[in-house]
Image: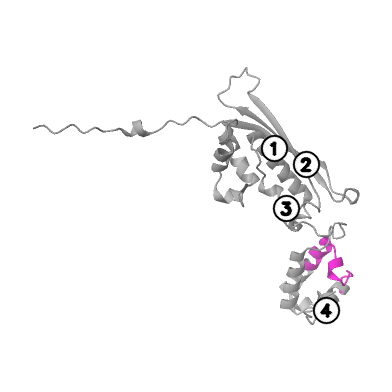
């Protein structure tokens, strides 16, 4: 007796055909964010570098121009505020050359100052503004909804709302000075006096802090150059 014929199902019959996701679909956000690698997200927020990488992939386009214009530079009269505008121009693939939708242009703007920037970046408002502006332009072009680029967020902003610490020495610089002074057995207050800088470290400017570190680096290269008047490390030098 012949065996009953076994019904088989080919693999192609079990695969469901999925239509391409478009920016108008509810799943668009998930599709775009899914193109990012783990290191292109910070606490779930896409980085500007990541958005830049996937922009042409997600939209099936070619970027022909990406320019940033700094429209405001920091000075004492604008609270050290920087403003930048980033403009992207791109061409969509698969669209007829005569179509008015072939070429696209989007822009994003950002202003940065001590009150909306992490302390660690407060001395670089122009660079932060440029990155934030680019992130916003990329988000706008990608039509992402309720998504913020990681660089647009600030969790540790300046705690002095009067801006008195603008341009002052940073905590990282203070720590570095302490480490070097301890290693070289240098009294920081005496060193500051020797260099004609304020002996209260928090009153030292960021630029002068760079000079202090540079001076300590010279001493590290040649210990014989350390003035006798500055020797004798004091661990309590940072106390007001």
> Dot 4: within a 10 Å radius of its alpha carbon, few (fewer than 14), some, or many (20 or more) residues?
some
Report the Cα–Cα distance between label 2 and label 4.
45 Å
> Is 219 in front, or is 27?
27
The stretch in magenta equals 194-213
**Percent x, y of residue 204:** 85, 66
With respect to residue 203, does 34 lie above or below? above
Would residue 203 be counted in the magenta stretch?
A: yes
Q: Gap between marks 3 and 4, in whole Å?
A: 39 Å
Viewer-side label of 3, 4: 3
Q: Secondary structure at mark 1?
A: helix
In percent of width and height, residue 199 lies at 87, 72
Residue to which mark 3 is pinned = 154
**Residue identified by numbered label 4:** 230
Quarter of the image that includes the C terminus: bottom right
> What colouring style does the render use?
one colour
Query: Who comes first in sequence, dot 2 or dot 4?
Result: 2
The Cα–Cα distance between marks 3 and 2, rounded to whole angstroms, is: 18 Å
- Front label number (3 vs 1): 3
The answer to whether the residues at label 1 and label 4 have Cβ atoms under 8 Å apart is no
Q: Secondary structure at mark 4?
A: helix
Please tell me which residue is depicted at 81% across the width and 60% down the height of the picture. 159
The disc placed on residue 84 is 2
Q: CA distance from mark 3 to mark 1?
A: 19 Å
Q: Is residue 86 magenta?
A: no
Rendered residue at 74%/65% (across/down): 172
Judged by depth in the image, the label closer to the viewer, 3 or 2, is 3
């Amino acid at each position: 007796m012949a065996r009953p014929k076994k019904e088989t199902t080919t693999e192609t019959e079990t695969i469901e055909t999925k239509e391409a996701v478009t920016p108008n679909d509810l799943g668009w956000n998930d599709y775009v964010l899914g193109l990012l690698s783990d290191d292109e997200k910070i606490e779930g927020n896409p980085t500007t570098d990541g958005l830049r990488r996937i922009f042409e992939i997600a939209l099936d386009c070619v970027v022909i121009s990406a320019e940033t214009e700094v429209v405001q530079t920091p000075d004492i009269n604008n609270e050290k505020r920087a403003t930048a505008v980033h403009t992207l121009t791109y061409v969509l693939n698969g669209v007829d050359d005569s179509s008015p939708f072939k070429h696209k242009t989007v822009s994003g703007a950002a202003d940065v100052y001590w009150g909306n920037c992490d302390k660690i970046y407060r001395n670089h408002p122009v660079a932060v503004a440029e990155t934030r502006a680019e992130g916003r332009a990329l988000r706008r072009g990608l039509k992402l909804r309720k998504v913020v680029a990681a660089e647009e967020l600030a969790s540790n902003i300046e705690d002095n709302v009067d801006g008195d610490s603008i341009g002052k020495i940073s905590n990282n610089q203070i720590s570095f000075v302490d480490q070097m002074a301890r290693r070289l057995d240098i009294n920081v207050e005496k060193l500051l006096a020797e260099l004609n800088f304020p002996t209260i470290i928090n009153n030292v400017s960021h630029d002068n802090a760079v000079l202090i570190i540079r001076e300590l680096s010279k001493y590290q290269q040649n210990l014989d150059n350390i003035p006798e008047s500055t020797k004798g490390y004091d661990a309590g030098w940072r106390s007001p």
